[in-house]
Image: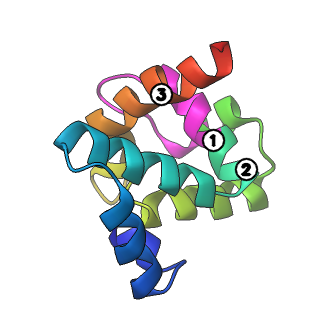
């Protein structure tokens, strides 16, 4: 929700939440679908490529190679995913490792892949 507030007025975010079904599963599904719709194509491409990420996370070189994005577009896409709280950073300052949140993985594997297979 916080990430959506960087893109939409508060009134719109609240109206959209009111319209969503109020079960926890439906609410999460709504949040992820709406966040997905706000992502630029490069961020979507990077996020999908991260489905292959190791449970320990991966470094920037791995992410860049898997995404197939040029360096300048990669940085912008990664920044958008971080701002949307879809990706988290672990490791340390000298060797950061990037991970997908469990709920993000669930969304990508169920909702998003299901829509593509339909």
Labelled pair 1, 2 in contact (Cβ < 8 Å):
yes
**Residue at the (30%, 24%) spot, across then down:** 55
Sequence-first tag of 1 and 3: 1
Which numbered mark, 1 or 3, is in the foreground of this view? 3
The magenta stretch spans which residues? 46-61
Instruction: Please state which of residues 35 and 45 is positioned toward the viewer in this rendering.
Output: 35
Where residue 62 appears, as percent x and y from the top left, is 57, 33
Q: Is residue 56 magenta?
A: yes
**Which quarter shows the N terminus?**
bottom left
Where residue 22 appears, as percent x and y from the top left, is 21, 50
Q: Secondary structure at mark 2?
A: helix
Residue under label 3: 111
Is 86 situated left or right of 65 in this image? left
Is residue 63 among the parts visible in the rendering?
yes
> Badge 3 local density, few (<14 within 10 Å), some, or many (20+)?
few
Labelled pair 1, 3 in contact (Cβ < 8 Å):
no
Residue 3 marker: none
């Amino acid at each position: 929700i916080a990430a959506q507030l960087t893109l939409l007025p508060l009134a719109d975010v609240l109206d959209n939440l009111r319209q969503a079904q109020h079960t926890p599963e439906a609410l999460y599904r709504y949040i992820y679908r709406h966040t997905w719709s706000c992502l630029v194509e490069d961020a979507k491409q990077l996020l999908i490529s991260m489905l292959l990420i190791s449970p320990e996370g991966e470094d920037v070189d791995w992410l860049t190679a898997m995404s197939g994005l040029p360096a300048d577009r990669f940085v912008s896409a990664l920044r958008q995913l971080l701002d949307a709280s879809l990706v988290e950073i672990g490791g340390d300052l000298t060797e950061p490792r990037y991970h997908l949140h469990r709920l993000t993985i669930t969304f990508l594997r169920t909702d998003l892949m299901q829509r593509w297979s339909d």
